[in-house]
Image: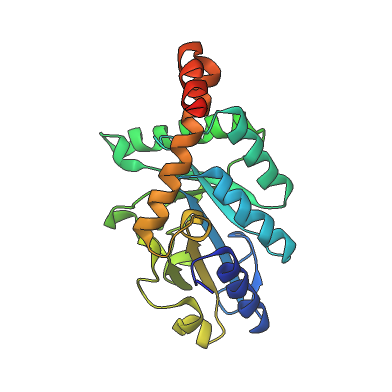
Amino acid sequence: MTEFSIPGYRSLLVEFEERGYRSVSFFDVDVGQRHLLLRHDIDMSIPAALEIARLETCLGCQASYFVLLGSELYNVLAPDSIRGLRELLALGHEVGLHFDATAYEGAEADLEAAAERECDILEQSLGVQVRMISFHRPAERFLGMAERIAGRLHSYMPRFFSEIGYCSDSRGAWRSGKPLEHPAVRGGRALQLLTHPIWWVSRGTTPVAKLNGFLNDRLDRLKRELGSNCEPYRDYLSGVREQ
């Protein structure tokens, strides 16, 4: 079994449960308890996130999914995206904002306003309150920052980042060791587990292979979408299929 796969993720969650861990929200975590914060940053694909969310619900887990509004890889406001995010909510998970601070220049007040504006867009689109923010590729100054942003908690506050354990699959690998071997887990303390659905859902045995698989699937979808909106390209696709 490949570790970074749907069966691999299922196995990981089951092992945490066998060690007495229970998934909780950011608002309920207790540093001294066997609490597991399941955090997912959606950098590339809402359908991939939804596949993970359905598995978590089947296993009785709750998680927080953070959506990137400025992504070139998916459109949060597209009908399929809205349906997918609403299904995430219906499954019992939380949706927050994945905020790319590098997209904004200027004073801290401008950053606050930008984060507030993006939260408003997400709230109006989904009809729910956005209570949490995670930073996309965070600058060093955001790691361990105690202050809220746009009046909301963020996932790198000390209570979630340094006072409890933290483990991430960034770049498609456990860069700081496997989560079950983390000192916090060995000591029976709380852990924030950050995963990116693309590494677990996409085909391939390496990060690059998984990304290439994702891009091929995305290209096929874009071709179908272009064909449905443009008759010349629809005719071209029909000709390709007939060859």
Q: Nearer the viewer, residue 56 or 48?
A: 48
- The residue positioned 62% from the left and 53% from the top of the image is 51
In-image side of 59 versus 140 (left or right): right
In-image side of 43 versus 102 (left or right): right
Q: Is residue 145 visible?
A: no
Q: Nearer the viewer, residue 218 or 75?
A: 218
Against 230, residue 134 (above or below) is below
What color scheme is it? rainbow
Q: Nearer the viewer, residue 222 or 153?
A: 222
Q: How many marks overall?
A: 0
In-image side of 177 versus 31 (left or right): left
In-image side of 19 versus 214 (left or right): right
The residue at the far top in this view is: 231
Residue 166 sits in which quadrant? bottom left
Q: In the image, residue 117 lies at what x, y percent?
A: 47, 30
Residue 72 sits in which quadrant? top left
Q: In the image, residue 227 lies at what x, y percent?
A: 51, 21
Q: In the image, residue 234 lies at what x, y percent?
A: 51, 18
- The residue positioned 67% from the left and 60% from the top of the image is 55
Q: Nearer the viewer, residue 63 or 75?
A: 75
Q: Is residue 153 visible?
A: yes
Q: Quadrant of the N terminus?
A: bottom right
The residue at the far front in this view is: 243
The residue at the far bottom in this view is: 187
Q: In the image, residue 7 lies at what x, y percent?
A: 60, 68
- The residue positioned 72% from the left and 51% from the top of the image is 91
